[in-house]
Image (cartoon, rainbow, N blue to C red):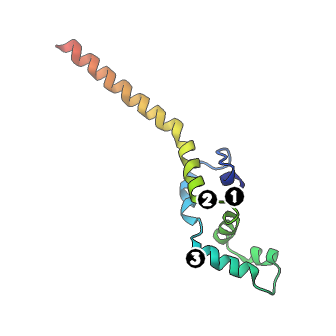
């Protein structure tokens, strides 16, 4: 949650981020988790420990404002450099093809 909140690309890879972005809790899931965590009985630490890993992730992500937007921004940040490299390779190929075409005429 801290890495997403601060948009820190050193903690998660792009592949990991793509895998977990679908587990950001919906508003209904947030509501249900808040209800569960605030139920009287067991203390919240014990309740948290009883959750499965995905639910723990969801609870942690509830502390982040705009988590989906931040995760998408982080994913863009992580993929930007490789996207630029791909564009440079493609531009170089087009340039070479243009050069060859102009020399063949």
Instruction: Give the label on residue 1, or none.
Output: 1
Image position of 86 with respect to 57: above or below: above
Q: Position of residue 39 (x, y in %)?
A: 75, 84
Q: Secondary structure at mark 3?
A: helix
* Residue 66: x %, y % from top left: 61, 59
Precedes in sequence: disc 2 or disc 3: 3
Dot 2 corresponds to which residue?
A: 67
Dividing the picture into quarters, in which one does residue 104 lie?
top left
State left or right for residue 5 relative to residue 91. right
> Do labels 1 and 2 touch, CB within 8 Å?
yes
**Residue 41 lies in quadrant:** bottom right
Q: Is residue 100 above or below residue 46?
A: above
Q: Which mark is residue 28?
A: 3
Which of the two discs, 3 and 1, labels the residue nearer the N terminus?
1
Residue extending farthest to the left is 105
Whole-number angstrom distance, CA of label 2 to CA of label 3 = 15 Å
Q: Say if mark 3 contacts mark 1, CB within 8 Å.
A: no
Residue at image coords 34%, 26%? 93
Which marked residue is nearer to the observer: mark 1 or mark 2?
Answer: 2
């Amino acid at each position: 949650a801290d890495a997403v909140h601060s948009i820190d690309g050193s903690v998660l890879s792009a592949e990991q981020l793509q895998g977990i972005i679908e587990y950001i809790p919906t508003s209904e899931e947030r509501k249900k988790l808040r209800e569960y965590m605030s139920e009287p009985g067991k203390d919240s630490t014990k309740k948290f420990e009883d959750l499965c890993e995905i639910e723990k992730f969801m609870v942690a992500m509830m502390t982040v404002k705009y988590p989906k937007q931040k995760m998408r921004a982080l994913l863009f940040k992580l993929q930007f450099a490789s996207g630029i490299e791909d564009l440079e390779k493609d531009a170089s190929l087009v340039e070479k093809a243009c050069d060859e075409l102009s020399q063949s005429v």
